[in-house]
Image (cartoon, grey):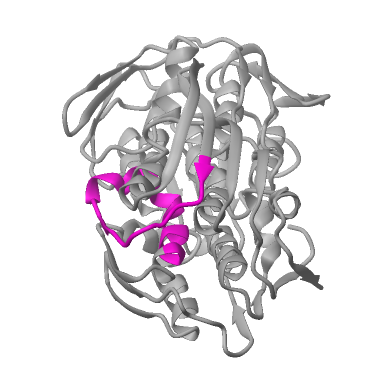
Amino acid sequence: MNKNFSVLVKKKIKKFNQTILVESDKSISHRALLISSQCIGKSILNDVLESEDVKNTILCLKRLGVKIIKKNKKYIVYGNGLSSFKIINNKNLYAGNSGTLARMLISLLATQPNLKVKIYGDSSLNKRDMGRIISPLTKIGCNFYPRGKMTLPLTIEGTDMPLAQNHVESIGSAQVKSAILLSSLNTPGITTIKEKKISRNHTENLLGAIKADIKVKKFKKENFISLRGQKNIFGFNLEIPGDPSSAAPFIILTLLTPKSKLLIKNVNCNPTRIGFIKILKKMNANIKIKNLKKKSGELVGNIFIKSSLLKPIYCPKNLVPSSIDEFPLLFITSSILNGVSKFSGIGELRHKESDRIRSIEIGLKQIGIKTKSTKDSLKIIGNPKIKVKKNLTIFPKNDHRVAMSFFCLGQLIGGNIKINNFETVNTSFNKFLSIMKKIGAKYEIKK
């Protein structure tokens, strides 16, 4: 992690008309690296996100004996096939702030025989629930130590006799689903997942694109996924598009800054990732997606945004899984609209890098915005005339989404808003501040 610093926002952003690129998709970057480590031969990955989270993925794989080199903007991964990890240096692997890395790496280690590895994270990750993957992975035969512990640090001992299972995934967690799929790559027989809550499907898309033996049957309200394990998969070439979650802050600023326009090029527009845009359109947002093309199973396109007069929303529950990372921004948006917005079925937000419902509520209440929450809902009574009457300090608790959201609020209402621990944004988006500067955002860095 980089040295600690804070960001101070004093002035509102002025109208702008820009074209930008955002950094590469973090979810796909993680998956491409982890899956290529299990392939036979060389994989060439273009535009891998170079955030703290993804760098930790690369370091963990190198410690497990995977050769990875960087050449220009490409990462070349030399895979040795399924169950090919070996311990280099020591048995401790650091996952930093990334739940995706921790859960998916654990799932690959689950079917690596003769390996016993300890995984730990930063103070935020070490509090997050790992029970949701411990339960299904224990059923296939691996062991976790200390027994009964549901948070990191954890030691995992892989099994040499993994058993295929039938799983029901009802949380709506892509990480849980992906953990089961990655563990099944080296499990004999057919592993199945009944996906009752649809979540992002990058793992299925990439496995399908590289001809793993995976099948996805789509029904109206659920998916049925099956994967036949212990089939060799081979190296691949992949271009990683821009991250829709990284596009989200710029979309919000464009919509709420009068007379502004923005074109964001080469963004991943996977339907399981753009619920955020669907919600905003229900709020009267002027957003268009153009030039859609399919690349390695993913829809990629350009997003065009114009400033709009947004209205409050009672958010449909069915759009929650496809917009889970963007809700802090939607909460910030709702806080400065005239009227009441309500979001239900969002309990998963309490299990992220921070309790995101509580984190946003604490900040909004400091500037006089009224909110009411339950375990899985949040009501926000917006006020477009709200002003910061005194210095406001935000403590994002190692949560990059919370930090970016309050940065955007500062750009929209002005006043002295100081966001501490802003280096946490580097876990997902190193160039956040530099791209904000390009569209005219004003801020000061405090060390």
- Which residue is depicted at the point 56% across and 21% down? 38
- Residue 202 locus on image (x, y percent): 45, 29
**Residue 131 lies in magenta, yes or no?**
no
* Above or below: residue 60 compared with residue 129: above
- Locate residue 196: give its quadrant: top left
Image height check: is 280 above or below 106? below
Residue 169 position within the rendered picture, expressed as x and y whole percent measured from the top left? 26, 40
Pick the front one: 155 or 255:
255
User: Does residue 62 appear anywhere in the picture?
Assistant: yes
Residue pictured at 51% horizontal, 29% vertical: 112
* Residue drawn at x 57%, y 70% as measured from the top left: 397
Tell me where residue 350 appears, x and y as whole percent: 38, 64
Q: Which residues are magenta?
A: 305-333
Is residue 324 covered in magenta?
yes
Q: Is residue 103 left or right of residue 167?
A: right
Q: Nearer the viewer, residue 146 or 78?
A: 78
Whether residue 186 is visible here, answered yes or no, is: no
Residue at far left of view: 220
| Whole-percent x, y for residue 344 in the image | 24, 60
